[in-house]
Image: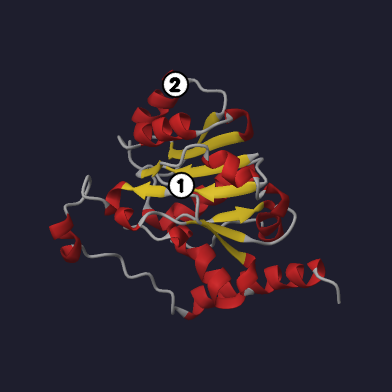
Amino acid sequence: MISLLLPCRRDSLLLPGFVESMLENTSDMNNVELLVSLSDNDTWCKSYLDRLNHSRIKYFTQPKPYGRFGLHDYMNLLCEHSKGKLLWHMCDDYRLVTKGWDLILKEYESYSDKVYSLYPCPSPDYKIAGFASPIITRKWYNTLNHWALFYSVDSWIGEVACSYLPRDKQINIPELDLKDLSYCDLYIPREDMDSIKFIDFPWEDPRVREWIREDADLLLEEIKNERPQ
């Protein structure tokens, strides 16, 4: 099974578009689950998902307002409830655009008992880097018992993998495309892109680097045990 993990914020009107893209492009929903996390005051999204009433889509609420700085708590909650062999980070402004994407990922389910991170390879037209939507194996999650310890959950996996893990533990999947509306003309005009002020993630903060290194050390120990001495 493949688990799509989607933290959703502030009564997002973008959520139905993601759900529609998933349902339209998934070949076998029996091998997919979509888990959505919401704050308990997010009435619009809860109402939408209740009306949809899809057996493969579930949502979970947290008794505190959603905010960017608590994003890792929402992702970790979804991981706790997930059943998939592969866990894929999603956002409400993403769109699954590859027909049969789940069949492509099914070929990688055999990797689930080892430590790997996997990445889609979006079209350059979509202006999104694959590391912004990482996929981890069940073994990765079970080793750490969390997705991230810091709110930049999309980059956390890439920071751990690219900074410390062997290159062959990072797999790009060229056939897997993904669209991010926040980086497309549909959502932000091309001429406005240069003027956007992005949050400066404190990756060089010693505490953050220590947490990343601790995650990497645990994963490296598992990787060492995977391979013949």
Which quadrant would the N terminus be assigned to in this image? top right
Work out whether mark 2 precedes mark 1 in sequence or the reverse, and give the earlier one. Answer: 2
- Residue nearer the viewer, 50 or 64: 50
**What's under tag 2, amino acid-wise?**
Leu
Above or below — where is 142 with respect to 168? above
Above or below — where is 114 with respect to 110? below
- One can see residue 220 in this view: yes
Q: Badge 1 is on which residue?
A: 90
Coordinates of residue 179 in the picture (x, y in percent): 36, 48
Q: Badge 2 is on which residue?
A: 52
Above or below — where is 54 with respect to 221? above
Q: Residue furthest front?
A: 175
Taking the spot 43% from the left edge, 79% from the top edge, the residue there is 204
Coordinates of residue 205 in the picture (x, y in percent): 44, 78
Residue 224, quarter of the rendered image: bottom right
Coordinates of residue 130 in the picture (x, y in percent): 45, 59
**Could you classify mark 2 by the number of other residues whose Cα lies within 10 Å: few (under 14), some (14-19), or many (20 or more)?**
few
Q: Secondary structure at mark 1?
A: loop
